[in-house]
Image (cartoon, rainbow, N blue to C red):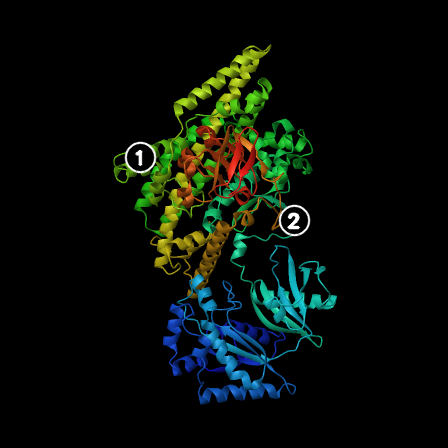
Amino acid sequence: MTARRLLWLDEIAVDQRALVGGKAANLGDMLRAGFRVPPGFCVTTAAYRTFVEGNHLQEGIDMLIRAAGRATDPYALFACPMGGAMEKEILAACRQLLDALPAGSRLAVRSSATTEDMPDASFAGQGETYLNVNPDQLLDRIRDCWASLWTARAISYRRQRGDILRAPEMAVVVQAMIPCDAGGVAFTLDPLGREAVVIEAVRGLAEAVVQGTGEITRYSVDRHSRASSQEGNNVLTPDQVQLVAQVALALEAHFGGAQDVEWGLWNGELYLFQCRPVTTEAERFFTQVLPGDDHVWTGGYLNERFPRPVSPLGWSVVGGLTEDLAFRDPLRYLGYRHLDRLPLTKLYRGHPYTNVAVFQILYKVFPDALVPDDAVRYFPGGDTSLRRQASYPCCPVDPRLVASMLCHFIHEPANWSPLHNYRHWARFAARHEMAMAEITQRLADSADLDDLWGIVEEAQRWSRELLGIHRWSLMAADLAVPLLGRLVRCWVSPERQAELSARLVSGLPNKSLELDQALRRLAGSTDPKGRGLRDFLAEYGHRSFSLDIYYPAFADEPEQVLRLLKVAGQGPDLDERLAGRESAEREVRTVLVARPLGRLELLFFNKVLALARRYVTLREDQRFAWQRTLTLMRRAFLRIGERLVDIGLFAQADDVFFTTFEEVGGLVLSEPSEAPRPQPTRLQPDIRLEIRQAVAARRTTFERLQREFDLAPHLTYPPFLRGNRPLEVTSEGEAGRWQGVPVSPGLVRGPVRVVLAPGQFDRIAPGDILVTRSTDPGWTPIFGRLAGLIMERGGQLSHGSVVAREYGLPAVVGIPRITEHLRDDDLVLLDGLTGTITLASKK
């Protein structure tokens, strides 16, 4: 059957998007559902095709695509006759429409492309809209709408989204023009994350809001209480505000998702001109909107582990484990009863945050002297006294706190006790190593979806057990290292305390330094790209620059290692570090022996020192073991992605990184396998399309967030939030001087090199002071080139701090936005004893 070239809006069904475009499909659906939409008709894509084919325009369109719309003026290209039959049909419909309207009425002519007003892309502003059109101008305006499909901006928009080959077509909506008293736009999803409908209104036509040319008044209507607030002059009455909000929410319910609604008021009636999905649906994964969110959130703790925006799969693999094991379980052990009401973690612009209330509860019972030094990064302004605002526990001997801790800890004393945890880890590490070897072999032999999913689930179980030990190792390190520093402070002069404390835990063997040494041996070998590289990757190939499994391990992308070979500096002199550690220990012992209770204090010092050294080492070694598990999971997920490409669910294997752990499991369990499975359910074609569209939308959002982070990390990853609004905390005092946390003693003057990602390593020259957000264990080889280190994040036990001490690099951390304040080649004085950074001269 030949497709119709013209349809009245009340004839259009919701499934006719390919014929009438997104805008007309939504308007027709709204009209049939009883919403007030101005009457009109749609010139369909069949008419567009007839016009293009009849005037032989495809060659010109192809030229526009190749030149991104610049080689030929699309409006001149489309300035061709429509043909007698089509013109007559359109003009007849126009007369029929005008006959039902008051004399002198004009028209609104709006583009309706097949690719616009979709959940993953609005195409907003790409097609033309013409208002107050005289009937004798109608044919020209329809041709202009068709031409707007091929402007430079429209082609560029589709190219950025990877849609250039989707072959879009343009329909055109012709409606009665409504001369509004007031108009605007309503969003049922507040961009700032509040549970509110946001209304922007102007006097006159809504177009002034869309174009940003009018004096806009902003209303916010709570979705639950319907209480409203206003910013700007009065445009709407309170009743009109409620009416717009009520209709917007009704449209959200009708379409099953947040909506962007263009509306107008005329003679007391509310008209709807456009309704489309809010195109942040995919982004809501990366910026979570929590009901009633007025919590304060910190990037501390998680920002060192995930320095860049996280992929959906990467976060779902690690985020749930982190929330359960690092936060939920400890709060339960403390007897906190309201876990179901307290959100613990969330994403903002792809970055993970933790509720500050978690750290308030965890640290409330700590006396000031025992609050870990690293805790400053969890509280705005580094004010650890904010922990006292927590309503629970009431005091260190709160009966519920004591009873709960005894009840929970008695079941696993070998794990939580600092005197036993490292032994517990040693036993686990042996089992873990054997299990990873078995999983590696299974992965090599497995091709069936069920087998691959079984590998993923087993690896996740090992990750859960590993992190269940690791959390207590971190706690032991957080207690032992600061305690060691405080003890030394009691026994030696303040001038010597920082240096001695750092030297006491320096020169300790760990997996990161072991990898570093192996890399240097590889650089000095006769065949660094042959057998030497293969041997290196066999031992260390599972390492990666991130815990996010989106990023490949060294073995999966060996070019990372070759780039490290080019920039790796000279490593620390381990004999010298060992000698420094031993001399510091002798100096403290000499002081203690001379004290009245020195021998008793010496016994305590020995025990604390041994624990601090054990757990500083375990911190790095456990990350090394965990990344082996994560790398195997990454490979298994990619194999699953390949199988899902084969059955048409994915366009490419790495689409799997834009699904979640649970979603991949659902897809695997929905597909018949070679082995019998109870009640298999094959996904229908429309579900497959929906999956591919959702994956594409998340990929697009993720890539955009990555670009935004590279452009302005200080804006896209603020250290603290209130709700979804950045909470500004500055550490800058007088101009050109910043105060941070000293983590590795020493004084150095040198040029700054601001580096935010491994791909920028080749910019680092010997003697530079590295300024960055945070470092990862994979950054270790570049430390040999540096003269000093400045980080926005971290504390004494951050990876960068530990390695800086190993290398003898002066280092200061915890200076928010320092990567914004300093620029390449700025000359600074870095004092690793006091934690101050002073700008000596600016580039």
Are discs 2 and 1 less than 8 Å apart at CB? Answer: no
Under mark 2, the amino acid is Asp
Under mark 1, the amino acid is Leu
Q: Is residue 783 above or below residue 662?
A: above
Q: Which residue is mark 2?
A: 294
Q: Is residue 512 above or below residue 109?
A: above
Report x, y in % for residue 116: 50, 69
Report x, y in % for residue 37: 61, 76
- Label 2 sits on a secondary structure element that is loop
Image depth: mark 2 or mark 1 in front = 1
Residue under the point 39% across and 81% down: 53
Crowd band around label 2 with a 10 angstrom C-alpha radius: few (<14), some (14–19), many (20+): some
Report x, y in % for residue 799: 47, 35
Residue under the point 58% across and 37% down: 738
Q: Nearer the viewer, residue 781 or 102?
A: 781
- Label 1 sits on a secondary structure element that is helix
Q: Is residue 458 visible?
A: no
Q: How many marks?
A: 2
Q: Is residue 492 visible?
A: yes
Q: Which residue is mark 1?
A: 522
Distance from disc 2 to disc 1, alpha carbons, whole Å, reads 52 Å
Crowd band around label 1 with a 10 angstrom C-alpha radius: few (<14), some (14–19), many (20+): many
Label of residue 634 in the image: none
**Res 164 → quadrant:** bottom left
Report x, y in % for residue 718: 57, 46
**Res 50 → quadrant:** bottom left
The quarter in which the N terminus is drawn is bottom left
